[in-house]
Image (cartoon, rainbow, N blue to C red):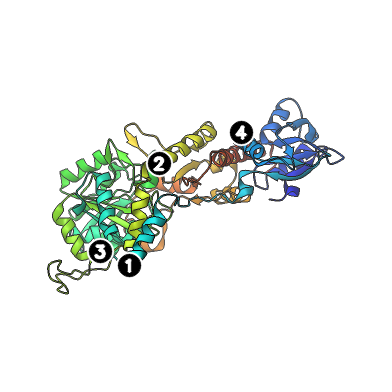
């Protein structure tokens, strides 16, 4: 937004200030006197305080001005960073006559993305080695090394981990290798990315969609129990956005009914359920290494099998169904789901940094919690006892009805402030291809979560100043909307 969008005369009314603030953006205005000189900042909080002190909407904006953190237009980078690190949304920049000529904010430096990879390790070194040695296909040594490194993280032998071309084919190959196909039912959550259900359909099985838990956002074990039939072959929990699913309850159901458990851990590399790594708890676990994931190979994925025989079959199917002991002799109709050596080289460099990435994700979650934790109607990601949430996405759920605004309209306001967001996934049962698999079951929790959910920027490259800025904008916009509703300006 330009300087004019964020500037108002202090002789304007509080009503005019509220209307201007309510157009979206950082939810702060720069106020100037009759000569255009800076007098301070105004936001929903200062207006609310002024009204509480006895002023009304026709009072001048000057009664709600807070003299705050302006800097000279020629301020050095260190001063700007220091000021923004204090959580200031915008920093007015003034000329020698104290007139605003520009403003600074974290979003002025760059539009803050939801996700972006950090490639600051050995990525270039390892990829260069692939090129120099000419091992660029799926036959190179980095593939085996990457599988071994994933295995170490999961506590599994390298032979039971397969690197594949993406997270979707990882799910499909796991299903096929475990013998799931026509006539079988697979129970999965309503709140997930479409790849979860698509791969079940592609394997020839029938997906059964069930509701999720309001706190964890993951599949509800009680809903799973109610959906089990004689045809049920597997449960497919999704560790959504890095939050571990309730695996003990699901494993107990699986044992009671002799079912397989396939973990969709696409978003949960590094997450742990009671000291067990997600993706290594069920019969198989799958991962995605798309560019927005905690570690990335650009495109890529992996499968971890608890059973060595299933892993061996999957390895054969991954390579066109070819007999590993007899080249060009095919044992089954297979697939080309291999990962290239160059992609695996990226993965090896990324997994070396996994602990640092996890630490930064947890720091970001803590910083958001400081600014968003006390806001009415804002539910933060659950931090459940004994579980390690990797916070692949920092997803909040807001009561937008109380704000008199939709989730998508709120996202537009953040976009005007230079903040990219993503909606939570749409419920599977609402989308045309998947309606036949909803049965007569109800999905109140998924529906409510989806309508109110928003994923915030959470890349490990995010600075502390950017995190505070994002949290501050959300807090100010929420306070502003509640005030607008209360005074009847909406």
Q: Is residue 196 something one can see in this rendering?
A: yes
How packed mark 2 is, by other alpha carbons closer than 10 Å (few <14, some 14-19, many 20 or more), is: few
Q: Is residue 198 left or right of residue 333?
A: right
Residue 190 visible, this angle: no
The quarter holding residue 15 reads top right
At 20% from the left and 60% from the top, the residue drawn is: 314
In the foreground, 57 or 260:
260
Whichever of callouts 1 and 2 sits on the residue coming sooner in the sequence is 1
Q: Name the N-terminal-most of marks 2 and 4.
A: 4
What is the CA distance from the residue labelled 3 to the residue labelled 1?
35 Å
- Which marked residue is nearer to the observer: mark 1 or mark 2? 1
> Is the residue 206 above or below the residue 30 in the image?
below
* Mark sitting earlier along the chain (1/4): 4
The residue lying furthest to the bottom in this view is: 328
Whether label 1 touches label 4, CB < 8 Å: no
Residue 271, above or below 314:
above
Q: CA distance from mark 1 to mark 2?
A: 31 Å
Q: Which mark is residue 86?
A: 4
Residue receiving disc 2: 356
Dot label at residue 134? 1
- Mark 2 and mark 4: span between their CA atoms? 25 Å
Of the two numbered discs 3 and 4 on the same chain, state the one appearing first in sequence.
4
Which residue was labeled with disc 3? 203
The answer to which quarter of the image holds residue 231 is: bottom left
Foreground label between 3 and 4: 4
Query: Dot 4, crowdedness within 10 Å: few (<14), some or many (≥20)?
Result: few
């Amino acid at each position: 937004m330009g300087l004019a969008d964020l500037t108002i005369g202090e002789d304007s009314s509080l009503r005019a200030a509220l209307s201007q603030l309510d157009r979206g953006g950082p939810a702060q205005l720069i106020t100037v006197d009759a000569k255009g000189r800076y007098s301070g900042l105004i936001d929903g909080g200062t207006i609310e305080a002024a009204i509480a002190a006895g002023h009304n909407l026709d009072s001048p904006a000057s009664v709600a001005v807070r003299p705050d953190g302006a800097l000279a237009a020629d301020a050095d980078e260190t001063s700007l960073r220091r000021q923004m690190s204090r959580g200031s949304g915008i920093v007015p920049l003034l000329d020698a006559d104290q007139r605003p000529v520009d403003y600074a904010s974290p979003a002025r430096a760059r539009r803050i993305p939801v996700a972006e990879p950090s490639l600051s390790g050995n990525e270039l070194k390892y990829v260069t080695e692939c090129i120099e040695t000419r091992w660029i296909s799926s036959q190179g040594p980095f593939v085996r090394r990457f599988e071994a490194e994933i295995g170490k993280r999961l506590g599994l032998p390298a032979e039971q981990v397969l690197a594949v071309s993406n997270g979707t084919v990882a799910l499909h190959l796991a299903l096929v290798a475990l013998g799931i196909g026509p006539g079988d039912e697979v129970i999965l959550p309503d709140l997930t990315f479409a790849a979860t259900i698509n791969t079940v359909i592609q394997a020839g099985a029938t997906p059964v969609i069930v509701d999720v838990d309001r706190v964890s956002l993951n599949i509800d074990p009680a809903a799973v129990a109610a959906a089990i039939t004689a045809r049920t072959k597997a449960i497919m929990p999704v560790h959504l956005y890095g939050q571990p699913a309730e695996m003990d309850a699901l494993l107990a159901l699986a044992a009671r009914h002799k079912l397989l458990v396939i973990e969709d851990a696409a978003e949960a590399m590094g997450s742990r359920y009671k000291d067990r790594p997600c993706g290594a708890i069920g019969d198989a676990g799958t991962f995605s290494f798309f560019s927005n994931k905690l570690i990335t190979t650009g495109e890529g994925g992996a499968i971890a099998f608890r059973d060595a025989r299933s892993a061996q079959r999957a390895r054969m199917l991954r390579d066109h169904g070819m007999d590993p002991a007899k080249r060009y002799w095919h044992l089954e109709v297979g697939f080309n789901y291999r990962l290239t050596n160059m992609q695996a080289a990226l993965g090896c460099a990324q997994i070396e940094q996994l602990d640092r990435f996890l630490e930064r994700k947890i720091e970001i979650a803590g910083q958001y919690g400081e600014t968003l934790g006390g806001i009415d109607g804002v539910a933060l990601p659950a931090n459940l006892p004994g579980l390690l949430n990797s916070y692949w996405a920092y997803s909040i759920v807001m009561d937008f009805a109380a704000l008199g605004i939709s989730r998508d309209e709120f996202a537009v306001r953040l976009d005007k402030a230079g903040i990219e967001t993503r909606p939570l996934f749409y419920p599977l049962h609402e989308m045309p291809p998947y309606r036949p698999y909803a049965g007569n079951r109800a999905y109140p929790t998924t529906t409510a979560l989806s309508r109110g959910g928003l994923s915030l920027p959470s890349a490990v490259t995010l600075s502390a100043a950017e995190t505070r800025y994002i949290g501050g904008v959300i807090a100010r916009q929420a306070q502003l909307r509640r005030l607008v509703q209360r005074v009847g300006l909406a």
